[in-house]
Amino acid sequence: MDKMIVARRIKHYRRTANMSQETLAEAVGVSDTYIRKLENGERFPSLEKLVALADALDTTPNHLLLSSTHLSKREGSSILDLLNDCTPTEFIILYENMSSLKESLRNHIK
């Protein structure tokens, strides 16, 4: 695991949440110096701190470690709620449209 990738993600999610290093530190129960060192890649969080960071930043540990995109718990839940509330026909239509859109996006980004 590249410490700098995790460091950039922590900083990105903190800024997206409009949190200062001090505010994040308080939410996680660490010093602002610890947060600064995490964001500079000088430290790597323990599993316990990683979970606390993810909770404070409204994301998951997987997003901090593995994902290249951000999807908050709230957004992920909203998407699932939307799909769970569909009729079978609506679900098929949405699925086919999302698949086509995903393919188009990937072809466009290349």
Image (spheres, rainbow, N blue to C red):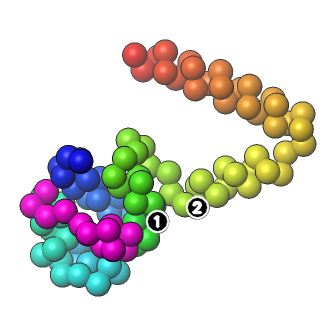
The residue wearing badge 2 is 74
Residue beneath the point at 26% across and 78% down: 25
| Circle 1 Cα neighbour tier, 10 Å, few/some/many (<14 / 14–19 / ≥20) | some
- In the image shown, does 21 or 4 lie closer to the viewer? 4
In the depicted structure, whether residue 82 falls above or below residue 36 = above
Image quadrant where one finds the C terminus? top left
Q: Which residues are magenta?
A: 41-52
Residue beneath the point at 46% across and 65% down: 58
Q: Is residue 87 left or right of residue 101?
A: right
Q: Is residue 38 left or right of residue 29?
A: left
| Circle 2 Cα neighbour tier, 10 Å, few/some/many (<14 / 14–19 / ≥20) | few
SS category of the residue bearing label 2: helix
Q: Amino acid at mark 2?
A: Arg
Pinpoint residue 60: horizontal percent, then vertical percent: 45, 60
Q: Is residue 101 left or right of residue 30?
A: right
Q: Amino acid at mark 1?
A: Asp
Pinpoint residue 14: horizontal percent, then vertical percent: 32, 63
- In the image shown, does 102 or 23 lie closer to the viewer? 102
In the depicted structure, whether residue 80 falls above or below residue 90 = below
User: How far is mark 1 from mark 2, CA to CA?
Assistant: 8 Å
Pinpoint residue 48: horizontal percent, then vertical percent: 33, 74
Q: Is residue 30 visible?
A: yes
In the depicted structure, whether residue 92 falls above or below residue 67 = above
The residue wearing badge 1 is 58
Dot 1 and dot 2 residues touching (CB under 8 Å): yes
